[in-house]
Image: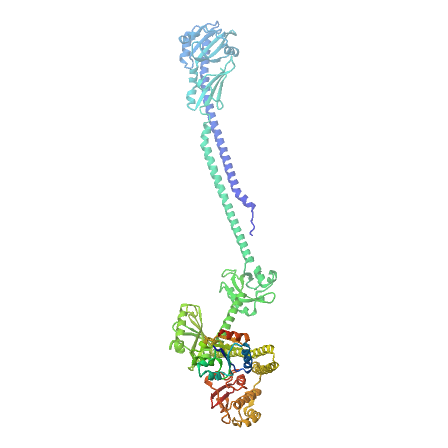
Amino acid sequence: MIKSICVIDDDEIYQMIIKRLITKAKAFDETSYFMSATEALQNFDENISNLPSAILLDINMPIMDGWQFLKKLENTFPSLYDHTKVYIVTSSIAYSDKDKIEEFPKVSDFLSKPLSVEKLEEIGNSMA
Amino acid sequence: MAKKVENPTRLKAKRRPILIGFLTFLMLLLAGFFMLWQRYQILLDDRQSEMAAIIGVAEQNIDQSLKYSYSAALSLALQIDEDGKIENFDEVAPQLVDNNPNIDAIEIVPDGIITKVYPYEKNKDAINYNILKDSTRNGEAFIAIERKRMFFAGPLQLRQGGLAIIGRLPVFKKNEFWGFVAVLIHFENLVDQSGLEDLAGDEFRFQFSKINPVTKKEEFFLNDTSEMDKSYSEKLVLPDGDWKIYIIPVNPYEPFYTIIPVAIMILIISGALGWIVYNSLKQPAKLQELVKEQAGELAKSELHFRTIFNQAAIGMARVNSRSGMILEANKKFQDLLGYSEEELKLMDYKVISHPDDLTENSDLMRRLSKDEIRQYSLEKRLERKDGTLIWVRINVSPLWEVGEEVTSHIALVEDISARVKAKQRLVDNENRFRSLVENSNEIILIVDDQNRVKYYSPSLAKISKYEKIDFAANGVLFYIHPEDHDLLRSKVENAYTKPGVPISDIVLRVKDAENNWFWVNATLTNMLAVNNVNGFVINLRDITGKKEAEVNLVKSYELVMEQNKRLLNFAYIVSHNLRSHSSNMSSILELYDTEESQEEKDTYVHLLRKVSKNLDQSLHDLNEVVSINTNMDIKAETVNVSEFIDQALDILSLQMHSKRARVINEVPEEMQVSFNSAYMESVLLNFLTNALRYSDPERSPIIELIGYKEGKNWVLVIKDNGIGIDLDKHGEKVFGLYKTFSDRKDSRGVGLFITKNQINAMGGTVKVESETGVGTSFKVTFK
């Protein structure tokens, strides 16, 4: 099975960092990076098999934030969590975000920035 | 303490009647007994005289008898001749004996020998008896011989039997003793002849005695009386025979016995008289005693009065009713006024009286003097020695009877300063409370259970504009908002069950005289049972202002809560923002450390620089946000909006030109608002910059600026034809911090946040209307 990971984050610098960390972790066969949720949605839309096995999702993004994206994704792919593990990755959970967490019980984990190589390896290994 | 008075004369006086009584008794007794003694003596004398008389008679009788004997003996002796012969004895003797009852026998005794005897038969045994030779009998015979006269011997026990006395008459012949002529008298006969038996009767006894010539002892011849007490006896001595005749009372104590009842009577009479004297003497003593007792009582009551006067807890003074001079004053009175009694005695009561009270006092005093009144009381002021005034109540009573001369009166003085003060305080309090009630902003009503308004405070008109009010006609509910009827009913029911307990915080709407509702906070107290109230006491406080303030407070609270929430969110946003930078930094540094390629390392340093720049930008933005939120000293001034718009357009003229933007400025010259000038500049620049930045690339931007008045407030509308914002999605977030709605890299989500905060800080509001692809319009309403 191909281990694919997808990062959705509008932070340009974070994107550069995470690319290098994933490379270092050597736990994934395929990677994809998106600067906005809308961009990611367009990519996933076509086929369910295009969905990566893991998504690292940022919350605070313009136009469409992480929650809105996740809602849409759940609607589009009801069986989303069968083949995809969703990780919310954020520097901190805002007060207003606390309620939101309850709405997405199937999210695998909430990870705090910065991510480490070890954490990425762990994510990769958990898929095996 | 009453001193106990011991009166020594009292005892004497008490004793004297006893003494006098006793003395009287004794004297009477003595006198009585003296008299009785005399009487006794008389009695004794009488008895003695009687006895003497009896003896006298007896003596005469015996003497008679003896004389007869003597005559008989002599007659016989004369018959004896010279020779000593007697011839006619037998003739003479019977004549002598038979005719003379005194003589029982007669003898011729020559030379002591009895030779002849008549009557012979009875006495023949004595014949030839020689008496001179009988030593037991011859003594008396010899006496007769010696005396040469008749001597009676015996009584002797006769030879011939019987007891008799023998009178022997010595007969001398030729001067020679011849012999005796003897007369024999039986002792019984002698006694009989003496008449003693008859004379003595029952009262007396008698006794014959004779000194025995042989034994020289007195011999008694009557047996039954031999032992008789001779103390009361009377005796008769018959020398012819050396006899003694005693007469003795049968009851020698009879006189004594007879006086005993008298003695007893005297005793009783003396005792009675002594008793009467004692009693009659005691009567004055008793009276004296009574007088003394009364005097003692008087002294005691005087002492009592003194004590009361001196120790009384109220002031007392005796005052000369004519002059007004104080005659006496007790301790309390002195204490009340601070003067000594000596000082007071030199004073007229008018001197210490307050001048304002004198008229009334003098008037009362005059009426008292005229007996129009018998006492009076008065509340007045007295001046103490130290000059201070005290209020007193005086009670004056005259010390003279009606119609008598006016002398002095007694005044009881009671310090009532405290009471007067308390009363004054009460009046003050009443005035104070009245003024409190009347000047209060609360309406106070007293309503009885028939809905009649018994009292309403003046504030009624002030607050409710009703000149007067009564619930009897329309009922209370007429004045109460329909929504509050149930509340009021339940409270009134509650008040009925809890007399005296204030039912408070009844918040109601009440209709005033102009049909406007106003809020009141009512307190209802059931005082139906309290005298002088007899109703519900209702306090109504107008709380309309408070109610409004309450609404404002709720609003403020909500505002504060909103701000608080915003601040909390802001803090999270800030921490999130800063953490995203710091996490990036730490990741980069970690990568840098593990990287070997110099080219890569350079990239990381480059990245680090970028992060640093972003961090700097973030801090700058935050600083700006914080300064708006914290700087309360930003001053508002009157700014001309039009002028500031011109300025901003001037600044942005280059960008306008490059975007070929067109501005339609419809802001009137006179539009002036109260705003901080720096904020105004910032707000206008931000709106205009946004309008240019988010312009639709398809068409050249058109920016409209419209200024107008909405009510009292100026409104500024900035409208563009840019890309617009999807408000359905982002509605609430348009003005949020770090909220961006485009994928433009240079939008940080700070501008509108700051703008809104600046407008709010100046008391204005901002609203947004937008349609994607059509344009956005911001409407600012100034304060």
Residue B164 at least partly seen? yes
Q: Nearer the viewer, residue B723 or A88?
A: A88
Report the residue at 48% width, 32% height from top. B36
Q: How is the image coloured?
A: rainbow
- Residue at image point 57% right, 85% down: B635
Q: Farthest residue in the left direction? A: B473
Callout count: 0
- Residue sitting farthest toward the front: A1
B107 w.r.t. B583: above or below: above
Give whichever of B478, B718 is nearer the camera.
B718
Looking at the image, is A117 positioned above or below residue B351? below
As displayed, is residue B739 above or below residue B38?
A: below
Task: Tell me residue A113's x, y (percent).
Answer: 54, 77
Q: Up-down: is B568 above or below B328?
A: below
Determine if residue B557 is in view: no
Q: Position of residue B93 (x, y in %)?
A: 42, 9
Q: Which percent across, then down, holds residue B379?
A: 52, 66
Q: Relative to the observer, which residue lies in front, A121 or B503? A: A121
| Quarter assignment of residue B601 | bottom right
Q: Is residue B115 left or right of residue B618?
A: left
Relative depth, front residue between B227 and B421: B421
Q: Position of residue B356 (x, y in %)?
A: 55, 70
